[in-house]
Image: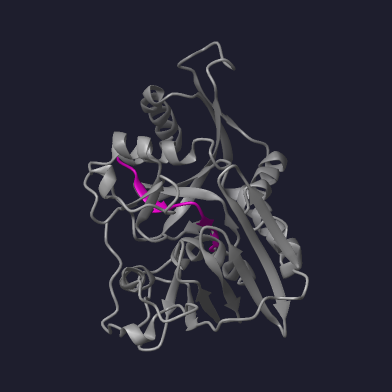
Amino acid sequence: MSKAAKPSVIPSRANALFAVQSVVEKQSIIEKLPDLFDKPLHGVQLLRDGFAQKNSGCQLFLQLRVGRNRKQRTTKPLWSLKDEGDRYSSLVELFCADQVDTLTIDCEGKGSFEYTDQSVAICWEENGTGPEHYFQSLGLGLWLEKQGVPCIHANALAIDDFAIGILAPSQTGKTTLTAALLHAGLAMMSDDMLALYQADNEWRVYPSWPIFRVWPDSAKMYAETDIETLPRVHSRFDKRIIDLETCSGLKSCQSSRPLKQLYLLDRQSTTESSQRNSVTIEAVSPAHALVHLLQNSMLGGAYSALGVEQGRLKKLAALLEMVPLKKITYNSGMELLPEVCKTLLADAKA
């Protein structure tokens, strides 16, 4: 499958895609970003000063700008999402002033994305996780929603000439099953977010960056690489980043595909099922399927604040008229995944 072509003009470091709170000395971040941001992302060609060429395979174009540091906000956010655990705390907030939306991130990485109709300014702190981790999902997802492109929390994989989507709440098996499906020969299209483009008689999926964020146990089983050489998603946690363009044994798809089916994962513990090797797939009614899509949306309650909630609901309902959602129920256990993959692939190709 073809790889995305790189623009012929290579920008200087002075034209970096993001601003930090001080002069950037962490050159590894600066050197990493151009290679990622030069590639199309969810059907969007990212543009910046010095990039004259546009990728004809993209549906939308977005200008990237350097953000400026801003003082602490005193206004109340239109929407916020806070999550806390034993070892982490994250806060995402949406502000609007002078018809400019700003999404602030206070997680393992800290910064903001400031939006106008055709551009986004990225301002980021030097220490912590870089902006690319948040931009490829929340950051771009908010802008896409304002362009009328719904985004859901899901992985997309290519099978032959079509795509399937894998939905599941965090930490319930989506990454592990995706790794097993890649090992079975499927190609990665998008990790963590699926942007849904409506065409005349179909819904299409466009690839994200050719990387896959995976836990070590899955990487050890399916990726032909030394786990310790893989960069961490966040410095304090063990999840790793696999470059699918260089990793032997796994592949990515860098062209769009029509979306054929969505699968909702229902992974059960062995105590919940008496049939250890049982794998079942059943259709979900459109009404219940719509609820699942809403539950697996990227930005929670932010859609009302953005003014896109009603239009988004209609588009998701229209999606389900053409793309069915099915629930796949199976038992937990790495040794059972080959059978799960076999069952899912047979259903997808039917």
Residue 36 drawn at (x, y percent): 36, 67
The residue shown at (26%, 49%) is 229
Tell me residue 7's x, y (percent): 29, 79
Please tell me which residue lies in front, 196 or 171.
171
Q: Is residue 288 left or right of residue 114?
A: right
Q: Up-down: is 24 above or below 208?
A: below
Which residue ends up furthest to the top in the rendered image?
A: 274
Give the residue at x 35% y 88%: 50
In the rendered image, which quarter contains the C terminus? top left
Query: Residue 225 appears in which quarter of the rendering?
Result: top left
Residue 120 location (% of width, % of height): 54, 78
Residue 110 rendering spot, x and y as whole percentages? 54, 66
Q: Which quadrant would residue 79 be assigned to in this image?
A: bottom right
Seen at 50% across and 71% down, the residue is 125
**118 relative to 233, above or below:** below
Give 84 or 165, whichever is nearer the viewer. 84
Tell me if residue 232 comes above or below residue 49 in the rendering. above
Which quadrant: the N terminus?
bottom left
Q: Residue at x 35, y 71 (%)?
A: 26
**Left or right of 32, for residue 249:** left
Left or right of 226? Residue 25 is: right
Task: Report which quarter residue 3 is drawn in.
Answer: bottom left
In the rendered structure, does residue 166 fall within the stretch colored magenta? no
Front-most of residues 132 and 328: 132
Q: Is residue 252 above or below residue 129?
A: above
Decide if residue 303 is on the left or right side of residue 227.
Answer: right
Looking at the rendering, the stretch of residues picked out in magenta corresponds to: 184-199
193 part of magenta stretch: yes
